[in-house]
């Protein structure tokens, strides 16, 4: 039971701030994934700063920010509704609370991610194409654009709506399992930490009522979020690498490549290890983003709660 106006207005502001802070790492991840060869994140960042300036680390940020607000609103709405309903249904069929909570979090994360891709895929296509427009050769990329609006017009003119949704299936396959893994891992890790600390739900080891301090609560949530982000990143980076390349690169004779051609090109460049290009920045992004997002998210829920709901 949330004050929806406060929840979405505060959420848009807080999450936009987090996105701005972490955006340069996303640019590094994307650059590593699409360029042939390999280089460390440090060398790549120094190269970008030396040859393109700080602004290059925020190329496409305006487009990303405009898409983040509706995508986050759709994500959070779907997440809360699904988590509450699935959690209640799981308890009704007799599942233990721990399993019901993990199941509810996983299903909610999957559903929320799939819903958000309706907004996020076009934003991803445009912002990623802007990210890779560096001083390197652009021969393998779809086009060069003057900005987000120019990219939108060009894609619609040349490919229509399907161009904006290039890789939608791969996005669902990437972010859906990633979100499900994240929320399931988050719930399981948090439960394990509370148990390790000697506490059950709102109770200490002696069964007495216990309300953790804000500092301890944030610490447990932050550690759980970082662990969950690391697990999700390691398991889903190959899908993310394939998705990113498919969305921004051209195939033979300037045609849209197939997923199979994208995978073949990637494997030809560096074998299966190439599927983990950008793993460092992606792991860092998901872990840092997860830590800041979940603490912000939980704080936002506490700020916006009107009365007790079904837990979370």
Image: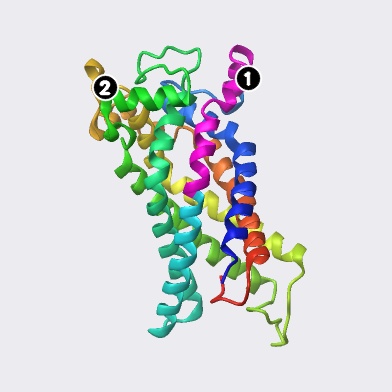
Q: Secondary structure at mark 1?
A: helix
Question: What residue is shown with label 2?
Answer: 251
**Frontmost residue, 133 versus 285:** 133
- Asked where in the image residue 165 lies, by quadrant, the reply is top left
Q: Where residue 107 sits in the image (x, y, percent)? A: 40, 64
Residue 31: percent from left, percent from top = 48, 26
Q: Quadrant of the N terminus?
A: bottom right
In this rendering, the answer to whether 81 lies above or below 58 is: below
First in sequence: mark 1 vs mark 2: 1
Q: 218 or 302, which lies in front?
A: 302
Instruction: Give x and y (percent) for residue 241.
Output: 40, 35
Which numbered marker is on residue 176? none
The foreground one among 226 and 69 is: 69
Name which quarter of the figure residue 111 lies in.
bottom left
Q: Residue placed at 48% from the left, 27% from the top?
A: 32
21 on left or right of 82 = right
Mark 1 or mark 2: which is in front? Answer: 2
Residue 80: x and y in percent read 49, 65
Point 55% across, 36% down: residue:
281
**Residue 62 appearing in the image:** yes
Near-viewer residue (234 or 300): 300
Q: Is residue 261 left or right of residue 82?
A: left
Question: Is 55 a magenta residue?
Answer: yes
For residue 269, say whether it is visible.
no
Magenta-span inclusion, residue 126: no
SS under mark 2: loop
| Label placed on residue 46 | 1
- Which range is magenta? 44-71
Q: Are marks 1 and 2 in contact (CB under 8 Å)?
A: no
User: Is residue 76 placed above or below 153 in the rendered structure?
Assistant: below
Neighbours of disc 1 within 10 Å: few (<14), some (14-19), many (20+)? few
Instruction: Look at the magenta stretch and give its main secondary structure.
Output: helix
């Amino acid at each position: 039971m949330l004050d929806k106006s406060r929840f979405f207005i505060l959420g848009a502001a807080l999450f936009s701030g987090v996105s701005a802070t972490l955006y340069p790492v996303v640019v590094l991840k994307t650059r590593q994934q699409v360029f042939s060869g390999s280089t460390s994140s440090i060398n790549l960042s120094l190269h970008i700063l030396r040859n393109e300036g700080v602004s290059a680390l925020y190329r496409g940020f305006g487009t990303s920010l405009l898409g983040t607000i509706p995508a986050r609103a759709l994500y959070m709405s779907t997440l809360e509704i699904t988590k509450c309903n699935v959690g209640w249904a799981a308890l009704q069929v007799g599942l233990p609370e721990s399993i019901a909570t993990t199941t509810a979090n996983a299903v909610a994360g999957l559903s929320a991610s799939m819903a958000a891709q309706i907004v996020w895929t076009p934003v991803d296509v445009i912002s990623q194409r802007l990210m890779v427009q560096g001083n390197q050769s652009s021969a393998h990329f779809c086009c060069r654009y003057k900005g987000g609006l120019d990219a939108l017009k060009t894609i619609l003119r040349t490919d229509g709506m399907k161009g904006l949704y290039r890789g939608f299936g791969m996005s669902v396959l990437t972010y859906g399992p990633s979100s499900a893994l994240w929320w399931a891992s988050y719930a399981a890790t948090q439960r394990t930490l509370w148990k390790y600390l000697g506490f059950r739900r709102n109770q200490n080891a002696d069964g007495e009522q216990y309300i953790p301090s804000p500092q301890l609560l944030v610490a447990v949530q932050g550690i759980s979020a970082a662990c969950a982000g690391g697990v999700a990143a390691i398991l889903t980076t190959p899908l993310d690498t394939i998705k990113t390349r498919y969305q921004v690169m051209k195939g033979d004779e300037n045609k849209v490549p197939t997923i199979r051609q994208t995978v073949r090109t990637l494997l030809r460049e560096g074998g299966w290890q190439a599927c983990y290009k950008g793993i460092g920045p992606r792991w860092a992004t998901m872990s840092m983003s997860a830590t800041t997002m979940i603490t912000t998210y939980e704080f936002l829920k506490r700020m916006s709660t009107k009365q007790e709901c079904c837990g979370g």
